[in-house]
Image: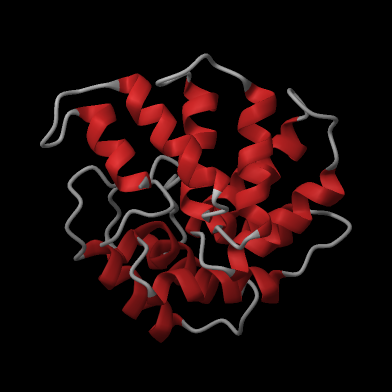
């Protein structure tokens, strides 16, 4: 039913009808389906097919998150971190980020790694490296570079220039044309590049 709602929203194989699309999303969400709750949350969040309503969006995302939908879990975490539409609560933000990361959300996994790298109180470079490595093994481009850097500088793991070379070569040979570029020689000499512009989910 959620898929049918998408067809009516965008006119895939049927005449576009946003009112009908919204009714289908709503009915599917009322059945407790986590993907439908997530999609309904998106409609409230962006104001597609219905009026924009952040309270209802959060309510839908939270229900989907509680059912294990990792994208919803990450969105709920951001609501708590931002504190714009609900009271700010960093403890709950961390809780839902960790949930999303464990359930495979790449954005959340990067956020966990950054937390362990940058948090002065809970700094744990070993845990950060493990998250980077998990993402790198899934061919996430940004993580591949960061794993190379960790091996080069001994961040969260033993310094290992052979492994650093292996991973930076993998980064160099990746396909995305828009990536920041660095040569092996400059990298091993200590030069760095800013990979913040690369999306968490971008594959090599």
Is residue 156 or residue 188 the one in the foreground? Answer: 156
Which of the 4 image quarters holds residue 67? bottom right
* Whether residue 66 is visible: yes
Residue 47 vertical position relative to residue 105 in the rendered view, above or below: above
* Residue 178: percent from left, percent from top: 23, 42
Q: In the drawing, does residue 170 fall left or right of residue 130?
A: left
Is residue 185 or residue 74 the one in the foreground? Answer: 74
Is residue 189 or residue 38 the one in the foreground? Answer: 38
Query: Which residue lies at the image location 49% right of the left edge and 75% below the top edge?
Result: 134
* Residue 170: percent from left, percent from top: 27, 71
* Whether residue 152 is visible: no
Q: In the drawing, does residue 87 fall left or right of residue 76?
A: right
* Residue 14: percent from left, percent from top: 14, 32
Query: Which residue lies at the image location 25% right of the left edge and 31% below the top edge?
Result: 8
Q: Residue furthest left?
A: 13
Q: In the drawing, does residue 172 fall left or right of residue 149?
A: left
Q: Residue furthest top?
A: 51
Q: In the drawing, does residue 100 fall left or right of residue 179?
A: right
Query: Which residue lies at the image location 51% right of the left edge and 60% below the top edge?
Result: 105
């Amino acid at each position: 039913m959620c898929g049918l709602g998408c067809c009516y929203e965008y006119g895939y194989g049927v005449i576009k009808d946003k009112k009908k699309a919204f009714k289908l999303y709503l009915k599917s969400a009322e059945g407790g389906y986590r993907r439908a709750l997530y999609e309904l949350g998106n409609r409230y969040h962006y104001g597609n097919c219905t009026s924009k309503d952040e309270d209802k969006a959060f309510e839908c995302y939270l229900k989907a998150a509680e059912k294990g939908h990792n994208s919803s879990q990450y969105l709920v975490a951001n609501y708590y971190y931002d504190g714009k539409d609900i009271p700010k609560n960093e403890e709950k933000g961390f809780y839902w980020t960790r949930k999303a990361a464990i359930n495979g959300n790449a954005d959340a996994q990067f956020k966990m790694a950054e937390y362990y790298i940058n948090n002065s109180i809970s700094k744990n470079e070993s845990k950060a490296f493990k998250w980077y490595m998990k993402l790198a093994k899934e061919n996430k481009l940004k993580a591949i570079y960061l794993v190379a850097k960790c091996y080069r500088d001994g961040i969260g793991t033993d310094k290992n220039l052979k492994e650093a070379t292996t991973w930076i070569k993998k980064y160099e040979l990746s396909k995305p044309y828009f990536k920041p570029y660095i040569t092996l020689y400059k990298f091993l000499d200590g030069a760095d590049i800013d990979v913040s512009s690369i999306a968490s989910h971008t594959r090599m």
